[in-house]
Image (tube, helix red, strand yellow):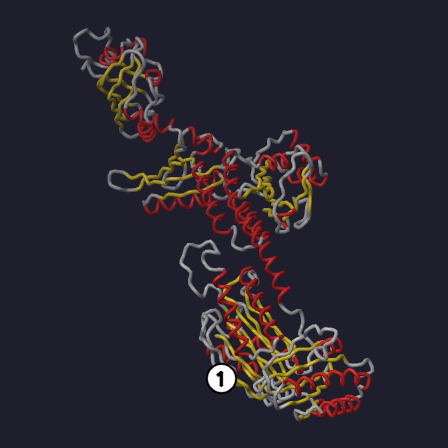
Amino acid sequence: MDSWGGTGGGAVEGRVPEDLAVVVDGRGVIAVWGAGARELLGYEAGEIVGRPAAELLAADLPESARRHVAGGLRWATQVALRHRDGDRVVVRLQGTPLADGDGGRPWLVTGAAAERVAGPAEVSAEALWDLTLAQLPVPVAIYDLDARLVAANEVMTRVMGRTVAEMRGLTLWEIEPNPPFDEYDRLQRQVLRTGEPVFHENHGQAPGEVRGHAWSMFLSPLKDEGGTVRGMSAAVFDTTEQYWARRRLAVLNDASLRIGSTLDVTRTAEELAEVAVSGFADFVTVDLLESVAEGEEPEPVPAGRPVTVRRTAQRSVLDGCPESVVPSGGTTFYPVDTPPMRALVAGRGTLPKPGDPGLQEWIRSSRARAESVHRHLIHSVMMVPLRARGVTLGLVHFLRHRTPEPFSEDDLLLAEEIVARAAVSVDNARRYTRERRTALALQRSLLPDRPPDLAAMEVAYRYLPAGSGADVGGDWFDVIPLSGARVALVVGDVVGHGIHASATMGRLRTAVRTLADVDLAPDELLTQLDDLVVRLDREEGPEARGRAAAPTSGEVGATCVYAVYDPVSRRCTMARAGHPPPAVVTPDGDVRFLDLPAGPPLGLGGLPFESVEVELEEGSLLALYTDGLVEAADRDIEVGLELLRGALADKAGPLEETCDQVLRTVLPGRPADDIVLMLARTSALDTAKVRTWHLPRDPAAVARARKAAGEQVSAWGLGEAAFATELIVSELVTNAVRYGDDPVVLRLIRDSTLICEVSDGSSTAPHLRRARVFDEGGRGLLLVAQMAERWGSRQTETGKTIWAELGLPASAG
C-alpha cells in the first residue's frame, strides 16, 4: 500500500487497483488522500484534499453507518462512490475512529473496490434496502425503546402531516395527543415490553388526511442477533376498500336478518330505515304509494302528473329526525320531472349530482325542504324505488350530512340490493294485510255482535285470535233462541287459520243455525254437521286445491259442542264432537266437567254421536270453550283444566268480569291458538208463566182447550191477544185430534212472547198447502201462519210439537 499523501496517476490498465486509504477529519473534510484512493477514484491529492468527503458519495451513506459515525463506533459497509470520470464505484469501506488531541474525531477510512459500473451509479444492497424503506408506498416508521420516532418514510410523513424532523424523538401521543393515538401508543409499548408483534385495525382520519381511511397496522419488534428488543417498526396499510366491502356485506347480512320480521307494512318500512341508518346513511325516509300503505293493490305510476305518497318510516343519526319536513304517517307529493318522480317512473335507483337542475327544483319545491338541506348541510342523496314482482310500491331516500364522503356507485348498488330485499317483505306484508282485512271482515260478519237478550240465561263470551292477532282463525260460537223459550249454545273449532278457515267456519255456523231451526236433537245435529264436513272435504280435496296428492279424508276438520237448555224443565241436552268437555258451576261454587261421550271430530264420517241430558239448578254456570284455552306447548292439558276449574270456582260475579278472570288465570301469555270462551248462567222460568193441559183425542176437547187458553191469557193480562190465541189453539188442537195420536198436550208459555204449543204422539210433520175453493179443510196452518209472528214444529221423544209465537201487546208489563 502506498504511503498516505502520495501522488500518482490513474489506474494502470491490467493492474489491480490498490486498496483505498483516506483520512477524514472531524468536520468530514478529506485530510489525507492515499495512492490507492487516487488509483481507485482517479482524483489527484491536490484535487481532493480539503474538500468534503460527502462529495465523493454516489448515494447516501447507509443509515446504519451514519448512526455508528454519530456514536464514534467502528463501522463497515458497502458505499457507492463517484469516479472522477463519472463512473460509479462500489467500495467495501471500513471506518475506524482516531484519537485527536484537539477534541475532534478524525476517521481512517479504508477499503477495496467491489465493482465499477460505467454509466448510472450502482447502489449497494444495504443502500437499496434503505431506499426501499424510504420509498415504500406504504407508511413505515421506526421507534426506539422509549417508543420515540427515529425515522419514517415519505408516505408516513404525508399521512401524519409532519416532517421527520418535526416528529423525531417524540412518541405518537406527543405527536398527536388525541384518540386513537393513545391506543396506538399503548400498543407500541406493549410490543416493546413483550417482544411480540401486534396487528391492529382502525377506521378514522389521520392528521394529514382530508377523509377517513381504514388502516391495518403491523407493529413488529426489532431484535439484535441475541434476540434483545432494540426498537420497533410500524407498517401501515390502507384497507379502506376492504373495510367498506366488509361494511357493505355486514349491512346486507343485517338487512336479511332484521327486515321482514313481521307482516306489518309500517314496521317493515321502519326496519329498512333502521338498517340503512346504522349501515351507511345519515337520514333515510321510506315513502309508499297511498294504495300500498293502505294494503291495497298498487296503482301504476303516472308519468305526466304528480304522485302523492305517504311517509311510512324515517330514521336519522340525529335524535328525532330533525331533517324531516314530513311527519311519519303524513303525505307529500313528487312534482313531475324531478329526481323522485323520474326514479319512480323508471323503476331504477338514481344518484343525482349536487348541481342537478332537477334536484335543485325538487329541493326548492318545498321551503321547509330547502331550509333543512341548508341547515343540516345535506350534501349527497340517493333515491331508490321499492319494487317487487315488477310493481313499484314506493321510494326510499338516502341522505348524508354527517358522513363527509358523498355516496358512491357502490353505495347505490348496496342501497338497491337492500331495498329490493325490503320490497319483497313490504309486498308480502301488504298482501297479508289485505287478506287479513278480508278475513276479519268475513269473520265479523259471521260471528255474533252481542249476546241476545234471553229469559232462559245470561250469556257472555270472549274471542282471542292466536298470538298478536296477526292471523284469523276458525273458532266460532253462537247463541241460538229456539222454540219453547229454549236456547242452543254452540262452540266450534275449525282446523287451520286464514280466509279458508274463516269461510269454513261461516258455512258450519250457518249449517248449525239451519239445523237448529228444525229443532234437531244435539246428537242428530252433529250427525248432520259431520255429513256436511265430509261433503266439504270432498269438494275441497287435493284436486280442488291444486295439489297432486291422492284424496284423503280429514282435509277439512272441526270439533264442536252443542247444548240445548230448556228453562221450563231446567234440563240441558248436550253432545260433543271431539271437543273439550263443558264445565258446570253450581250456585254454591262446585265445579265439575261433564262426562259427555267425546264423539269423533267432524269430518271422519260414519261414527255415532251421543247426547246426554243433565238437570241444572237455577243460577248454574255453564262454560263452553275451545282447546286453545287449556292446551299449551309447555304444559299438559290437565294442568289447563285445573286452572280453569280454579278460575270458575271463584266467588260468582258479573259474567263479563268472570270471563276476564278466567283468561287472566288460565292463559300464561299470548295464546298459541285461537280461543273462544262462552259462559252462560241459567235461569228457570216461573211456573206461574207456564200452563199445561192434557187433552183427550175428542173433537169436543177443541172447544174446552180454546176456552181454557183464552181465560189463561186474560189472567196474564194479555186480553188483547186472547182472540188470536184462541184461534191458534183451536186450529192446532183440531189438527192433533184429527191427524195425531195420543197423548195430546196443550202448553202456553208467557215469555218475551206468548208461545202456544200442541204436542201429540204422531211424528208426521205438518206442512202448509194451498186449499182449493170447495175444499172443507187445509186452511188451518195458513191461518196460524198469518196470525203468529213465527211458527214451526219439532220432533220429540214421543212424537212432535207444533208451536206458534205471538207478540205481547204493548200494554203487557
What residue is disc 1 on?
A: 595
The answer to which quarter of the image holds residue 702 is: bottom right
Q: How many marks?
A: 1
The image shows residue 627, relative to residue 737, as above or below, that is: above
The answer to which quarter of the image holds residue 169 is: top left
**Residue sticking out furthest to the front:** 774
Name the quadrant of the N terminus: top left
Residue 112 can be seen, yes or no: yes
Q: Amino acid at mark 1?
A: Asp
Q: Position of residue 386 (x, y in %)?
A: 57, 42
Relative horizontal placement of residue 626, taking residue 119 as reference (left or right) = right
Image point (45%, 56%), residue name: 543
The image shows residue 738, relative to residue 441, as above or below, that is: below
Q: Position of residue 187 (x, y in %)?
A: 40, 45
| Most foreground residue, 5 or 521 | 521
Could you tell me which secondary element the residue under label 1 belongs to? loop
Residue 656 can be seen, yes or no: no
Name the quadrant of the C terminus: bottom right
Q: Position of residue 296 (x, y in %)?
A: 62, 50
Q: Position of residue 337 (x, y in %)?
A: 66, 32
| Most foreground residue, 681 or 144 | 681
The image shows residue 240, relative to residue 260, as above or below, that is: above
Question: Crowding at label 1, few (<14), some or many (≥20) Cα neighbours within 10 Å?
Answer: few
